[in-house]
Each structure stands twice: as structure tokens, then as C-alpha cells.
Image (tube, grey):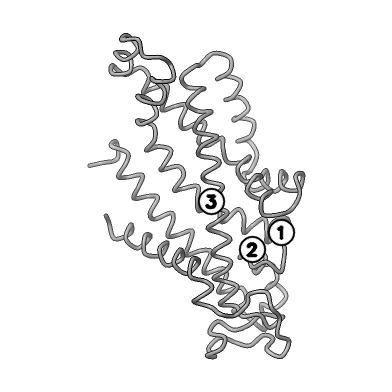
Amino acid sequence: MTFKAWLGLGVLLAVVVAALGAPWLVPADPVTSDFGSMLKPPGSAAHPLGTDQLGRDLLARVIYGARLALFIGTCTVAVTAVAGGLLGLVAGFVEGWPSTALMRIADVQLSFPFILLAMTINVIVGLGLRNIILSLSAAGWVVYARVVRGEVLTVKERDYVQAAAALGAGRARLLFRHVLPNVAPSIIVVASLQFSQFIVAEAAISFLGFGVQPPTPAWGNMLAESRDYLYVAWWLAAFPGAALALTALGVNLLGDWLRDSLDPKLRV
């Protein structure tokens, strides 16, 4: 592993440990207001990162926001990888008009900006955590479908697949025993790179008011609430923004290493 990969892994592990250990790391309640402690600056023992406009501990809110971001990212990646991957496998293996129709749908969807499409779907299906995962998944499956279909079109023409077909292997066996293992690295790489995209997209949607709603701590709505206090309480935007940026950076660095490791064409 390269230095960048170790750095990305270290950042991601720190975020995961903090998120999983939130109840023990920060005993303060992230949603309980304390009007006697409003807008306290960072540096105190009771509130290391300060407090927000309602007196809520900012460290607790940032760490609990990490739990939400990782949960949404993990669930969305799982849904899109399974749904998009299966559609890409079938479209590449079967071909014909179903494959053509699916790719035309993917082309139309890719013509829309990802965040705008996800936000539009979220407005239609309604607000809430479950609906955010559904909207991000509905907007993100096409990447897996196109990548996997392209890989399948190449893999299914290889000699070992043709030999298995000549020996009487059924379509299901060919697809899941011989083709899927060879396209799985591409799915893993896309998933690692899209994880950070989903986290940032969720923050953007919440920032605009269409995602996770206050008082639930989410990095996006924390940044939205900080807009009116930028000149008097810089820490309200600095710490959630830094947490979002570092998490996305860590995932991207690790994803780059996975891409270089799993793609033999990139090896020197």
C-alpha cells in the first residue's frame, strides 16, 4: 500500500471508530439544547469544539453526524451495487432489445446532474432518512450498470467462458460462476469511489433543506444552520465542513488505491 492509501485508510478508520463509539466518546446529547451555553467558542473542557446557537455540544453533533453519513453511504452503496450490478450483468450477457432499452434509460438519466436528480426524486417521494437512501440509489445505479455491462461484453467472449458454454454450462452458471468473479473488481472500485459521492450528495441535499431534518445531527443541515453565524461563530461551519471533507478525502484516497490494485492495466 502507498502512503496515500495508508492515509486514506487511517482517516476512514478514525471516522468509523468515532462513529461507532459515539455514545462513549461524547456523553453529551447531540439534540439537547442548553440556552445558557449558546455559541461558546472551542477550547473548553466541557465543549472542546464549542456549542451551537442552541447550546448543543458541537463535538457530539459532528460525531453523531458521522454515524448518519456512514450509514447512508453504506446503505446506498449496497443498494446501487446490487441493483446496478445485476442489471449490468443481465444487460451485457443477454444483449438484444432489453440491453438496448436499459442503456437508453441510463443515457437519459446520466444527462441530468446527479445531485439535482437525487434531490428531485427525494422531493417526490418525501423527506426522511429512508427516502434519502432510495433517492440516492435511484440516481446512482446507472454507473454500475454501464460499467458492469461493458465488462461483461468483454469477459463473455473469452476462451474460458466459451469453453464452459461448449461443455454445457447453463446461462446462470456462466453468469455467476465465470463472468461475475471477473467483473467484481470493477464493482468494488466503483463502490469505493461512489461512497464519498453519496456522502457529499446527502450533505448537499440536507443543506438545501430536502434531506435529513433538524434536530437530527447531519453535516449538511449543520452547515445550513451555521450560515447566519459565520461572522460570530466560525466553528459552526468549520468543524462539520472539515469532517465532511476529510471523510470524502479518506474514501477517495483508498478508492484510488483499490482501483490501481484491482485493475491490471494500471499496474506498471
Label 3 Cα neighbours within 10 Å, binned few <14 / some 14-19 / many ≥20? many
- Contact check, label 3 and label 2, Cβ < 8 Å: no
Examine the image and state in which quarter residue 172 appears: top left
Identify the residue at horizontal 49%, vertical 77% (top origin).
25
Nearest the camera: 133 or 39? 133
Q: Provide the residue designation for mark 3.
A: 197
Identify the residue at horizontal 66%, vertical 77% (top origin).
230
Callout 2 secondary element: helix
Q: Provide the residue designation for mark 1.
A: 208
Callout 1 secondary element: loop
Nearest the camera: 111 or 100? 100
Q: Position of residue 153 (x, y in %)?
A: 42, 21
Mark 3 or 1, nearer chain start: 3
Q: Position of residue 242 (x, y in %)?
A: 52, 69
**Whether residue 218 is situated above or below residue 80 in the rendered picture:** below
Examine the image and state in which quarter residue 41 appears: bottom right
Q: Position of residue 82 (x, y in %)?
A: 51, 37
Using the numbered discs, state the Cα–Cα distance from disc 2 to disc 1 in whole angstroms: 8 Å
- Contact check, label 2 and label 1, Cβ < 8 Å: yes
